Amino acid sequence: EAGVAQSPRYKIIEKRQSVAFWCNPISGHATLYWYQQILGQGPKLLIQFQNNGVVDDSQLPKDRFSAERLKGVDSTLKIQPAKLEDSAVYLCASSDNDLDRGSSYNEQFFGPGTRLTVL
Amino acid sequence: DAKTTQPNSMESNEEEPVHLPCNHSTISGTDYIHWYRQLPSQGPEYVIHGLTSNVNNRMASLAIAEDRKSSTLILHRATLRDAAVYYCILRTLYNQGGKLIFGQGTELSVKP
């Protein structure tokens, strides 16, 4: 089974530039997550999609970050304009949980991440 | 979701057992205990989870205290590949489809 794919793996930009990250989840997974991981810290959720609808975006800095998941499959996360403090690894994860059904654990599968450096 | 406390770092020798502790004194009756680990330059991966009883799988064992205020992840024979950051996370039954709230985790180093 193919895992979660992300691209690019690395990106270096100047502050105030724009950048976009792409994620392809595991086939059939309804739920997709974007996490931000700053060096030395655990990942922090930015946004969660169930199919193509947003479930939780409470931690997403909406003045500069946006995300979409067209057709309930692939997703893109955009930063415009970037700030120095946006330097981090951006992780995409997916799971096959049905929020209506519920489950005891709903394992999340993570991609390798995109390492963003803002200069 | 309730908070967990883990040591910042631990060391182990290769082929010896490793016991990674986690305190969760404010755990509620509907909280499941999950462990994920993050190998260098990779995304986190699921290790194990449990509610009240001890659990075993091919990767590790999870020992849960009788009062559920603490738990221990046990790697029976550490290998160099087990060097990673290990995260102990509580998820309520009603948030099983939702976000994982990661703390700092425990950075495990394994010496040959």
Image: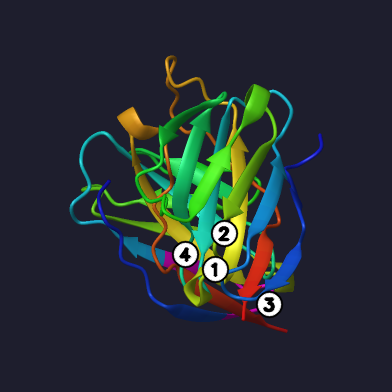
Pointers 1 and 2 within a single chain? yes
Image: magenta residue range: B12-20
Q: Is residue A96 visible?
A: yes
Residue A42 lies, in percent from the top left, at 47, 64
Q: What kind of residue is marked 4?
A: Gly
Q: Earlier in the sequence, mark 1 or mark 2?
A: 2
Residue A53 lies, in percent from the top left, at 50, 25
Query: Which residue carries the number 2 mark?
Result: B37
| CB within 8 Å, label 1 to label 4 | yes
Marked residue chain, label 2: B
Structural crowding at the residue carrying mark 4, measured as other residues with C-alpha within 10 Å and reported as few (<14), some (14–19) or many (≥20): some
Q: Is residue B44 visible?
A: no
Q: Is residue B7 left or right of residue A12?
A: left
Pointers 3 and 1 within a single chain? yes
Q: Which mark is residue B14?
A: 3
Q: What kind of residue is marked 3?
A: Glu
Residue A111 lies, in percent from the top left, at 69, 50
Query: Which residue carries the number 1 mark?
Result: B85
Residue A104 lies, in percent from the top left, at 43, 28
Query: Which residue carries the number 4 mark?
Result: A42
Is B18 drawn above or below residue B96 in the view shown?
Answer: below
Which mark is in front, 3 or 1?
1
Which mark is in front, 1 or 4?
4
